[in-house]
Every structure is written in C-alpha cells, then in structure tokens.
Image: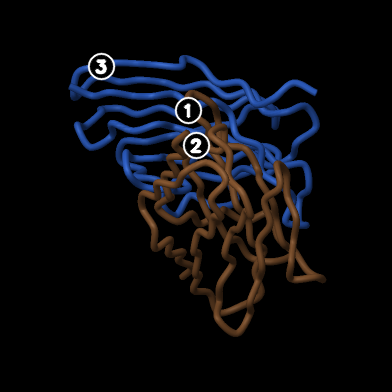
Chain colours: A brown, B blue
Amino acid sequence: AQSVSQHNHHVILSEAASLELGCNYSYGGTVNLFWYVQYPGQHLQLLLKYFSGDPLVKGIKGFEAEFIKSKFSFNLRKPSVQWSDTAEYFCAVNEAGTASKLTFGTGTRLQVTL
Amino acid sequence: EAGVAQSPRYKIIEKRQSVAFWCNPISGHATLYWYQQILGQGPKLLIQFQNNGVVDDSQLPKDRFSAERLKGVDSTLKIQPAKLEDSAVYLCASSRFEAAGGEQYFGPGTRLTVT
C-alpha cells in the first residue's frame, strides 16, 4: 500500500526566508509525485508534478521540488517565501502511468509573517 | 474552462439523518473521484469512476455511503445514516486522461458537520 509522510506539520517563516518542506513516500513501484497547495478559503490547486525525466521540477510561483529516488523523497523548496505563500501544502503520490487515486500526506501548514 | 463544481458548500445535519452531495466535473474529464478530508488529515479516496463505471471503491463504507455517476458526467455521493465521524470535507476531483497519470482538478468541497 502507498503511504506519504510529511514531517513538518506547522512551519512559521519570516518573509524572504527560504523554505524546504519534506515529503517521503512508500510504494513498491514507479510513482507520479505531486505537490498541491490550499490557500485560505480556496480549493486544492496543483503546485507542481513529477512524472518522469528531470528529477528537478519547477512549478508555479517560484516553487520547485526534487525527486530523489534512492531516498523516496520529493521535497518542496522555495528560495524566498512571500506572505502570500501562507497556505497548507500537501504532498501526494499515485501509481505511474495510471489515473489511480492520489495518496496524500497529512499536510504542512505554512505561516509566513511580515 | 470552468472548474469542478460542488454543492452544497456547507451542510449541518443530525446523526442518523441522510445527506447528498453533488459534483459536476470539468467537461470532457473521464475520471471522477470523491475524497474525504477529515480535519488535520490529507484527503482519502472514497470512490473513483471512469466514465460511469466504478474503478475503485475499496475504501467506501458501503453500509452507509453510496455514489453514482449517471451518464458519465455528474455524480452524487450519499450518506445514510450519517454518524458523528462522518464530519469532514468531501472533495470531488476530475481528471482528463484515462490512464496517463493526468493532473486531478479539485472542486471547492462540501463541509459536512454531523451533530
């Protein structure tokens, strides 16, 4: 069975600080990897995704993530956060080459202070 | 293109009552998902449809939950009777590709409170 672990439940950063959110997954096969974001009062939106190829993927709003297969990790990074990045971030995985269900982590709440 | 639509946005019911949620996916999306998100947790799949057939309902509590997707478009999710632990946000998502790991687009969700 698939599982996803997000180690940071609540992160507080000042504007302009760098961000790294951890995500590890457990699955016996090849996976697709996703980061979704939920801004306050809004629905889940895709931030970035990895299907194959270059393990460093770039998403919207300056976010990027690196897939490290040997570590089963897909950490999210941003060099300089803004107040508008305050949101909940979810890492998710599904079986590669399919439209199967997403297995989500428990989420990380990011609070950016001015 | 229009996003995934869900209604109602909020619902409060008493335990043992029934409730139904509606979802209209993005036009042309073959795959439709219902997820349950309990406070403090990530969404968990309840049921997945491809066109109007069920692909995965292994996590659906079938003694009280039911879902259908008529004509492969709209879908309804019903709970009867509701329990306190059903309090959650119910998310509908849709995906264009039938077997290529396409992105899932989420609706705004229905927040259910069972008292």
Instruction: Give the numbered dot on residue B13.
Output: 3
Q: Alpha-carbon distance for marks 3 and 2?
A: 32 Å
The picture places residue B29, in percent across and down from the top left corner, at: 75, 36
The picture places residue B35, in percent across and down from the top left corner, at: 48, 41
Dot 2 lies on which element? loop
| Chain under disc 3 | B
Q: Identity of the amino acid at label 1?
A: Pro
The picture places residue A66, in percent across and down from the top left corner, at: 66, 68
Instruction: Give the numbered dot on residue B63.
Output: none
Cβ–Cβ under 8 Å for marks 2 and 1: yes
Dot 3 lies on which element? strand
Ranked by sequence position, the earlier of labels 2 and 1 is 1
Which of discs 1 and 3 lies nearer the camera? The answer is: 1
Q: Identity of the amino acid at label 3?
A: Ile
> In the figure, B72 relative to A10: above or below?
above
Q: Nearer the viewer, residue A84 or B30?
A: A84
Asked if labels 2 and 1 share a chain, the reply is yes
Dot 1 lies on which element? loop
Q: Identity of the amino acid at label 2?
A: Thr
Q: Mark 2 packing: few (<14 Cα in 10 Å), some, or many (20+)?
A: many
Residue designated by label 2: A86
Q: Alpha-carbon distance for marks 2 and 1?
A: 8 Å
> In the figure, B111 relative to B46: above or below?
above
Residue designated by label 1: A40
x 25%, y 28%: residue: B82
x 24%, y 19%: residue: B17
| Chain under disc 2 | A
Asked if labels 1 and 3 share a chain, the reply is no
| Chain under disc 1 | A
